[in-house]
Image (cartoon, helix red, strand yellow):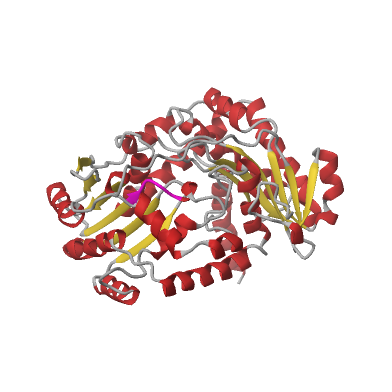
Amino acid sequence: MKHFIAGLVLFALPLSAQVADQATPPAPAAPRQPHIPSAVEKTLANGLRVIVVEKKNVPLVSARLMIGTGAAADAAGHAGLADMTASLLTKGTTTKSAEEIARGVEALGASLDSSASFDSSNVDLNVMSPRLAEAMAFLADVVRHPTFRKDEIDRYRAETLDALEVELHEPRELSGFVLSRVVFGETPYGHNLSGTPQSIRKITREDVVKFHRRYYRPDNAVLVMAGEIKSADAFALAQKLLGGWKGAGPKPAAPKPAALPLKPRVVVIDMPEAGQAAVSVARVGLRRADPAYFAAQVANAVLGGGYSSRLNEEVRIKRGLSYGAGSGFDFRRDAGPFSAGAQTKNESAAEVAGLIADEMNRMAAEPVSDAELTPRKATLIGDYARSIETSQGLVRRLSSLALYGLPLSDVSSYITAVQAIDAAQVQAVAKSHLAGAADVIIVGDAKKFLEPLKARFKDVEVIPYAELDLNTASLKKK
């Protein structure tokens, strides 16, 4: 036993020296530029834009048919209409029931999903390349010939209402709903993507049919395909299945930007039964096409884009006030939201809100050092490289570029653009889009944090949960 212990000690000595040497992680290596095949495109006679990337050696194909309209076009009082329309596409067509669609897609070993965002509505397909033509027939059918049966609408409505009932009693989820209203008011981005209980009950089958007829049209759509398929074959398949697709009437214009609320708000939703408080600090962010997009990405990576970010360091690591704090820009056709937040115990909600605001302001007051900037850029670059490794990830990136009118070649220049961002650019975007007055939203037990919150922030609005109305910018029931 003595000899055994002595051996362990001798083994531990070099190991402890090695650990000491690794106390400071090595600097990131120079980024590698991934090889991305060039996209080729063609616009069909009906206005459908088709984009194809040929990727060899993996017999898979991913496709997305993207409609250039989403929840920003929801009619007043009908929040959730775009999301409902997209979700119902796969629930029956003029030739197939929802069950027949599901079984047919499954028999091909494929997946077919539909959803909406604020700026687009999407149908996504993944399938082995030998079965692509059969699978694409399902995609074309659900986009062109949905029936929107009443029983499927009723089922969707019931499921959505159940989900909303749960989400509206979760501080973190409710905070996101309130944030949209506080930041964007009554403008197109001011409502919840999936709606509210009141708006979901109000949407009729006629509303869904009208939304589909108006916006689901080839001259408002882009088909992106990537995988083991030749571009000529992809264009021929698109022509066969979607070339006869027609739109009714003139192409609808994109929603015009509306005037945003001018005065920042500090809003507390008083939920006495909440075990924790959800804290958010938010501002209007940037458009996806903004020239400062890459600088904003890097700035957010430093502030709250990962475990080693400043927010997580201050809120979690130093003070133990949350399991995690973070931030992010949601880049859209018009300026989307920027938000930073954390979930914490009610008693520390005001402290966390102050810490987040302070860190946002510090980004503008002090230049970021190279020692901090270099690894955060490396993280962004690594995440991006992983996101385009699959055909599905590449399709989503190209779809976003097409949606926002950006060159498709940008998919290959992301790494170079991020690497070129310096401390001065980060500080500049922080001054314009992070620092200064911001909206503060806290959902929790107000009596446990209200006084310190009022000591830090002015004009605090307290709205009892029972009086909350997400259907209006005031957030208060009349």
Q: How many marks?
A: 0
Q: Residue at x 48, y 57 (%)?
A: 81
Quarter the N terminus occupies: bottom right
Q: Residue at x 29, y 46 (%)?
A: 222
Residue 357's place in the image compared with 320, above or below, is: above
Q: In front: 151, or 285?
A: 151
Q: On the picture, is 266 further left or further right than 154? A: right
Q: In front: 44, or 472?
A: 472
Q: In front: 309, or 431?
A: 431
Q: Is residue 87 magenta?
A: no
* Residue interval drawn in magenta: 66-70
Q: Residue at x 23, y 59 (%)?
A: 60
Q: Residue at x 46, y 58 (%)?
A: 83
Quarter of the image where one finds residue 93: bottom left
x then y, percent, for residue 23? 58, 44
Is residue 390 among the parts visible in the rendering?
A: no
Q: Residue furthest top?
A: 424
x then y, percent, for residue 357? 70, 38
x then y, percent, for residue 278? 69, 54
Q: In front: 103, or 181?
A: 181
Is residue 428 among the parts visible in the rendering?
A: yes
Quarter of the image where one finds residue 106: bottom left
Overall secondary structure of the magenta stretch? loop
Q: On the picture, is 18 further left or further right than 98? A: right
Quarter the C terminus occupies: bottom right
x then y, percent, for residue 108? 23, 70
